[in-house]
């Protein structure tokens, strides 16, 4: 049987006076890797419906390369707590939208918590790890406590001049939760695997996260 992958994306579309949403590369590059591997892919969003794309992520993109991936964003189903039991892995792509609606979603908290507790594969990249910040184990501790992780760095956020626009800085938050945070230089491809948890630093790390998730799934 092919592996079943759940991809959860943001519905949030504004940051300050600018448009934001899902960062296309972080979704579409792993989608293509999972598809080419023959995985059964389901795409859901926090609220359901169409998914906003960060306009900056569309610059210079050959949309034909991502045609199938884009079609999956047109009318998504809303995530529900029941989604925790039906998949072998969950993948959380980023985009600044995620830091607004991922941490507020009780469904996402429940799904990620249950998948962590049942040793399912959890992957995320860039701002996607915002969806890990509320998830807990049965003892109430954060799923990232003591785990080696990475995510969009505070330094990268500063370069984007968005530190005042986001509700929290992701690197700082993960460190506060007890994660062992690792990073490379700004905008460098960097991903880490700790057991069944795979995280990537920025958009440039999207393919690396997907390949690492595939590697973990192949060993199961």
Image: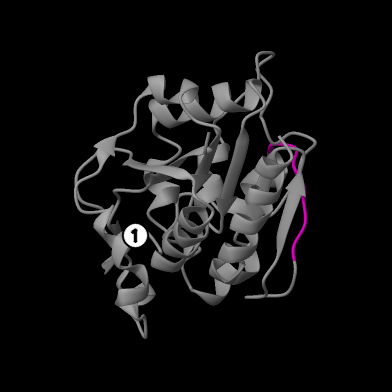
Work out whether residue 129 or residue 69 is closer to the camera in this orientation and state it: 69
Q: Check the picture and name the quadrant holding the C terminus.
A: top right
- Most extreme residue toward the top is 139
Work out whether residue 152 or residue 44 is closer to the camera in this orientation and state it: 44
Please identify the quarter of the rendering in which residue 135 is found.
top right
| Crowd tier of the residue under label 1, counting other residues whose Cα lies within 10 Å: few below 14, some 14–19, many 20 or above | many
Look at the magenta stretch and give its main secondary structure: loop
The residue that disc 1 covers is 69
In this orientation, does residue 16 appear?
no
Q: In the image, is 133 to the left or to the right of 81?
A: right
Q: x, y (%) of residue 125? A: 56, 56
The answer to if 116 sits in the magenta stretch is no
Q: x, y (%) of residue 87? A: 49, 30
In this orientation, does residue 51 appear?
yes
Query: Is 30 above or below relative to 118?
Result: below
Please identify the quarter of the rendering in which residue 119 is found.
top right
In what element is the residue under mark 1?
helix
Q: Residue at x 62, y 75 (%)?
A: 187
Work out whether residue 145 or residue 214 is closer to the camera in this orientation and state it: 214
Q: Residue at x 80, y 36 (%)?
A: 146
Q: x, y (%) of residue 169? A: 56, 54
Q: In the image, is 220 to the left or to the right of 88?
A: right
- Most extreme residue toward the bottom is 60
- Most extreme residue toward the front is 1
Work out whether residue 66 or residue 176 is closer to the camera in this orientation and state it: 66
Give the magenta-colored segment's residue range: 177-183
Q: Residue at x 54, y 53 (%)?
A: 37
Q: x, y (%) of residue 15? A: 33, 60
């Amino acid at each position: 049987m092919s592996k079943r992958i759940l991809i959860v994306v943001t519905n949030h579309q504004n940051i300050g006076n600018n448009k934001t949403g899902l960062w296309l590369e972080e979704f579409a590059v792993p989608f293509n890797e999972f598809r080419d591997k023959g995985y059964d892919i389901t795409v859901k969003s926090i609220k359901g419906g169409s998914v906003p794309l960060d306009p900056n992520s569309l610059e210079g993109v050959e949309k034909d390369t991502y045609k199938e991936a884009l079609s999956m964003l047109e009318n998504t189903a809303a995530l529900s707590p029941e989604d925790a039991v039906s998949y072998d892995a969950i993948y959380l792509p980023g985009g600044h939208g995620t830091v607004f609606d991922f941490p507020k979603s009780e469904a996402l908290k429940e799904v990620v918590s249950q998948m962590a507790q049942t040793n399912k594969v959890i992957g995320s990249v860039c701002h996607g790890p915002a969806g890990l910040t509320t998830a807990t184990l049965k003892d109430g501790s954060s799923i990232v406590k003591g785990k080696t992780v990475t995510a969009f760095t505070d330094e990268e956020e500063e370069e984007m001049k968005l530190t005042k626009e986001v509700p929290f800085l992701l690197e700082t938050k993960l460190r506060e939760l007890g994660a062992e945070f690792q990073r490379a230089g700004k905008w460098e491809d960097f991903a880490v695997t700790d057991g069944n948890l795979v995280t990537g630093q920025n958009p440039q790390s999207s393919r690396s996260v997907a390949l690492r998730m595939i590697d973990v799934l192949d060993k199961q």
